[in-house]
Image (cartoon, rainbow, N blue to C red):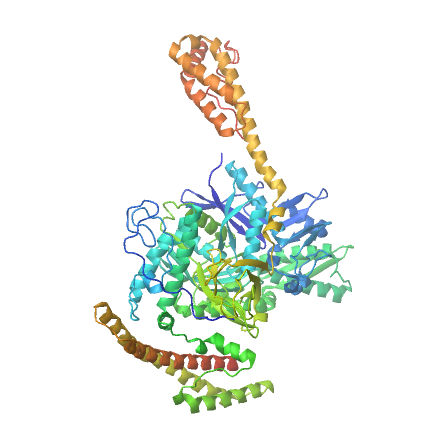
């Protein structure tokens, strides 16, 4: 059974979730372990089978070289972007990485690109949903940090495709959160969403009015979150251990992961306790103990959480709003549980933030709401429409290495801009265009998105061709480019060289084979189960024909049953689930009266003093009879 | 290499008032069909035409916003996600055109620049990108300092230079910073006043358009005069805006 069900997925740095709209309410779909959160951890077991989520966590300590976490930090990034990251995270890059190649991470002796690792997480979520619905799920809305650039968005979309998901929309995380919030509140006003997660920070300011969720301004930092707090605490512990005990564990992955686990637990406890005691068993039988007070901790993390202030102020400035014009500040992301973060938000926006939402789940719930809207809506979402913006300006490199901005940040998307190009040499056939994203004036300070080569420009004198290039940012925040030479009317061919990211062919090659098989398996299993159900029913019917009840049927009824029986017998060998299902249902329907008559005779037999079990009905109506449906997983 | 950084769609004649819907055939349909709700293929029109507005500069901002939301509810890709591939494409194009048009028209300066662009006037030499291009290539930008500002600009540039020198040497000069801040405030006031001046010229322009649509001829000379006044104000205003930006940069760095 295939439906057009669309799920909402929060692909987080630390945890990932899948949700759907149950009636008029979004709900999270739990995993097999009954838990809503799937840790974004991927490991390879000794058979090189991928293990995802909670089951993968022990690998972080036991076989750290076969496990990876916080992969979201590497999505859509190049080697030169992640130097800082590599100092703090145990990412093991493939040794044979060529310059300009998409990153590859080592797990055991295999290597994976960040989209492939994310795809494994997505596949797990997809499986969780399939188990829940008992049907295949192939369409999803996936959330991304609002401040993600084009390459990071494209990488997320690629991950979906690799996982066998059609990504109908990428939704910005704070915006998704506002959908879940707005569905609940149904109030007009200005809302700021402060989203501090495991690895990313976003601030979005929205105007909510009559169901339209219009983002006015957004800002953020795609490398700022709870991870940074963890790393700080790990560094302090490692320094302590080195100083006091003379042991250097910095290169001992197992020790680092043990410490990481302990400091994360400490961090969480410090949100509710005035002080905690770190007590860590280190490799080699040593023990590290240290007390951390809340005050001490808050001083330590101050510089990290203070980094959220700049983006908030910029967003307010871009929205041309003063803090007092904000009606509500909504907190999203696990790191907003930290009291010091809440205090900072309160000071910034001069009001008590709204903490009524589950900061871990609200983004996924919002994604489910958006999935519902895309699927045609329901009563609850009927009037809802999201108008989001592009977080970064889009520019073109012009003479002198300067960025010429053609679509400014905070423009409502979809948005487009048209530029005209010409040639500089007689007969020039190619024109190179360098597309950039960012706010800086110099091209070298902006993010390079892609280099385009306009090819097949008809030969003309220099300056004569008039090539119209249209840049369009779609509702996912992803750029599309098309070009046309206006004088000749020829479509110019565009050769795209993405600066960071996989080509279409690469993505095709990565699509998880096992995943496709899983879908095939699911379909095949359905057919097999339907066939066995058909056998059961046909066998029960044979028995029924020998029962006294059969004689009570009219000739017409018998004829009708025989017709359906033949039809089921004919289609049950076919490879199509729906056909078999329909024939089963028809026969079930047609033998309804026979079943009732058999049941009556069974009851009257029982009334004659015999128990049902003893009644001589063969395997009669108590066991499989024509109405009984086979168990269906 | 780029000839135009200003903007986008070239004006084409307005679509026929009575177009038929590609899907249900009968109804009049411009952006979407009023009968069956289907998104229509986009026609390359200018932003004023897109909203069914005359090329006048005074416009009802509240009505524009209302139209923007109403059209968004019809054209946005999220609401056409289940439509056929062709319709999804149209929805994407129509919706980006809607957003581009709304963004341009709602802002008084962008609206005026866009109208002048439609009228064939290019303001490129005053644009930010031109300033930056010139700065990067070291060329002197062909930019006319508004005569009434000459003296002030000269003084300010000297002070900015002084400030940069101080900062380079790590020195602090609160008096200089205060003086520059005061001038910046004055410049911002000027910028505001120029906007009011611009709005006065809108009236002149709009009257021409009204006369024209009432069937009275308007000479090219009259049009040009009205345009030139706006171009002059915009040039002065852009010049001041760039100055303010330079001041901000000098103060922040």
Relative to A510, residue A489 above or below: below
Residue A304 position, x and y percent, is: 58, 67
* Front-lying residue, A368 or B201: B201
The answer to whether any part of residue A197 appears in the image is: no
User: For the point 55% across and 33% down, which residue is it?
Assistant: A523
User: For the point 58% across and 44% down, which residue is it?
Assistant: A124
Q: Quadrant of residue B216?
A: bottom left
Residue A595 position, x and y percent, is: 43, 16
User: For the point 41% across and 88% down, which residue is it?
Assistant: B149
Q: Is residue B220 left or right of residue A553?
A: left
Q: Quadrant of residue A451?
A: bottom right
Specify the quadrant that holds the C terminus of chain A. top right
Residue A545 position, x and y percent, is: 47, 10
User: For the point 36% across and 64% down, which residue is it?
Assistant: B11
* Front-lying residue, A53 or B198: B198
* Front-lying residue, A108 or A186: A108
Q: How many marks?
A: 0
The answer to whether any part of residue A275 appears in the image is: yes
Q: Is residue A495 left or right of residue A406?
A: right
Residue A208 position, x and y percent, is: 38, 59
């Amino acid at each position: 059974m295939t439906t057009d069900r669309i799920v909402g997925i929060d692909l987080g740095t630390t945890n990932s979730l899948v949700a759907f709209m149950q009636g008029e309410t979004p709900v999270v779909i739990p995993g097999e372990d009954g838990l809503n959160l799937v840790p974004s951890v991927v490991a390879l077991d000794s058979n090189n089978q991928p293990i995802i989520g909670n089951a993968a966590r022990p690998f972080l300590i036991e076989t750290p070289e076969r496990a990876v976490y916080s992969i979201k930090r590497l999505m859509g990034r190049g080697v030169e972007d992640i130097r800082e990251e590599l100092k703090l995270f145990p990412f093991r890059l493939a040794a044979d990485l060529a310059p300009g190649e998409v990153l590859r991470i080592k797990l055991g002796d295999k290597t994976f690109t960040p989209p492939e690792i994310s795809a494994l997480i997505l596949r797990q979520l997809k499986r969780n949903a399939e188990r829940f619905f008992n049907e295949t799920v192939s369409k999803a809305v996936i959330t991304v940090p609002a401040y993600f650039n084009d390459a990071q968005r494209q990488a997320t979309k690629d991950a979906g495709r690799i996982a066998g998901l059609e990504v109908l929309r990428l939704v910005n995380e704070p915006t998704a959160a506002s959908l879940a919030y707005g569905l609940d509140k149904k109030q007009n006003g200005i809302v700021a969403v402060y989203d501090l997660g495991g690895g990313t920070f976003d601030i979005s300011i929205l105007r909510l009015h009559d169901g339209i969720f219009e983002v006015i301004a957004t800002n953020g930092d795609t490398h700022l979150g709870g991870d940074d707090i963890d790393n700080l605490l790990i560094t302090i512990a490692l320094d302590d251990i080195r100083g006091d005990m003379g042991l250097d564990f910095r290169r001992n992955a197992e020790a680092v992961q043990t410490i990481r686990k302990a400091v994360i637990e400490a961090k969480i406890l410090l949100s509710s306790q005035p002080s905690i005691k770190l007590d860590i068993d280190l490799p080699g039988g040593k023990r590290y103990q240290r007390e951390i007070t809340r005050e001490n901790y808050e001083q330590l993390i101050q510089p990290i959480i203070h980094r959220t202030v700049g983006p908030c102020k910029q967003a307010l400035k871009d929205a041309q709003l003063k803090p007092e014009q904000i009606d509500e500040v909504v907190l999203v992301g696990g790191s907003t549980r930290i009291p010091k973060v809440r205090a900072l938000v309160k000071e910034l926006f001069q009001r008590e933030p709204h903490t009524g939402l589950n900061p871990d789940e609200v983004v996924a719930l919002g994604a489910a709401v958006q999935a519902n809207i895309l699927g045609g809506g329901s009563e609850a979402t009927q009037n809802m429409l999201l108008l989001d913006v592009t977080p970064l300006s889009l520019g073109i490199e012009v003479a002198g290495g300067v960025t010429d901005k053609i679509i400014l940040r905070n423009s409502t998307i979809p948005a487009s801009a048209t530029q005209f190009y010409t040639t500089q040499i007689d007969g020039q056939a190619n024109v190179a265009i360098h597309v950039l994203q960012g706010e800086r004036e110099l091209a070298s300070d902006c993010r390079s998105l892609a280099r385009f080569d306009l090819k097949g420009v008809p030969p003309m004198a220099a300056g004569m061709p008039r090539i119209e290039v249209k840049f369009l940012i779609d509702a996912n925040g992803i750029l599309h480019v098309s070009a046309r030479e206006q004088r000749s009317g020829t479509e110019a061919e565009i050769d795209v060289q993405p600066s960071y990211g996989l080509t279409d062919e690469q993505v095709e090659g990565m699509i998880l084979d096992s995943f496709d098989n899983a879908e095939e398996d699911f379909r095949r299993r359905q057919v097999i189960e339907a066939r066995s159900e058909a056998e059961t029913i046909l066998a029960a019917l044979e028995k029924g024909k020998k029962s006294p009840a059969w004689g009570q049927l009219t000739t017409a009824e018998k004829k009708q049953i025989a017709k359906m029986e033949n039809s089921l017998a004919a289609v049950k060998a076919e490879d199509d689930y729906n056909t078999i299902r329909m024939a089963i249902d028809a026969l079930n329907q047609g033998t309804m009266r026979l079943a009732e008559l058999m049941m009556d005779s069974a009851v009257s037999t029982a009334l004659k003093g015999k128990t049902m079990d003893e009644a001589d009905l063969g395997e009669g109506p108590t066991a499989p009879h024509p109405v009984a449906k086979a168990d269906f997983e | 290499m780029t000839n135009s950084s200003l903007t986008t769609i070239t004006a084409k004649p307005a679509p026929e008032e009575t177009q038929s819907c590609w899907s249900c055939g009968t109804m009049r349909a411009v952006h979407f069909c009023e009968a069956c709700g289907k998104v229509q293929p986009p026609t390359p029109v200018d932003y004023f035409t897109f909203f069914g507005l005359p090329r006048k500069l005074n416009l009802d901002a509240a009505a524009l916003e209302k139209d923007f939301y109403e059209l968004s509810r019809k054209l946005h890709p999220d609401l056409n996600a289940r439509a056929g591939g062709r319709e999804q494409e149209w929805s994407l194009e129509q919706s980006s055109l809607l957003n581009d048009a709304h963004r341009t028209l709602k802002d008084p300066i962008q609206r005026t620049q866009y109208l002048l662009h439609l009228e064939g006037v290019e303001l490129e030499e005053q644009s930010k990108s031109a300033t930056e291009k010139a700065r990067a290539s070291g060329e002197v930008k062909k930019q006319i300092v508004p005569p009434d500002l000459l003296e002030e600009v000269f003084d300010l540039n000297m002070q900015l230079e002084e400030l940069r020198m101080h900062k380079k040497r790590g020195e602090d000069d609160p008096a200089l910073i205060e003086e520059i801040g005061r001038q910046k405030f004055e410049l911002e006031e000027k910028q505001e006043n120029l906007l009011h001046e611009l709005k006065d010229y809108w009236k002149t322009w709009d009257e021409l358009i009204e006369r024209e649509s009432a069937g009275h001829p308007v000479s090219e000379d009259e049009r040009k005069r009205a345009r030139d006044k706006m171009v002059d104000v915009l040039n002065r205003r852009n010049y001041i805006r760039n100055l303010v930006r330079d001041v901000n940069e000098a103060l922040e760095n």
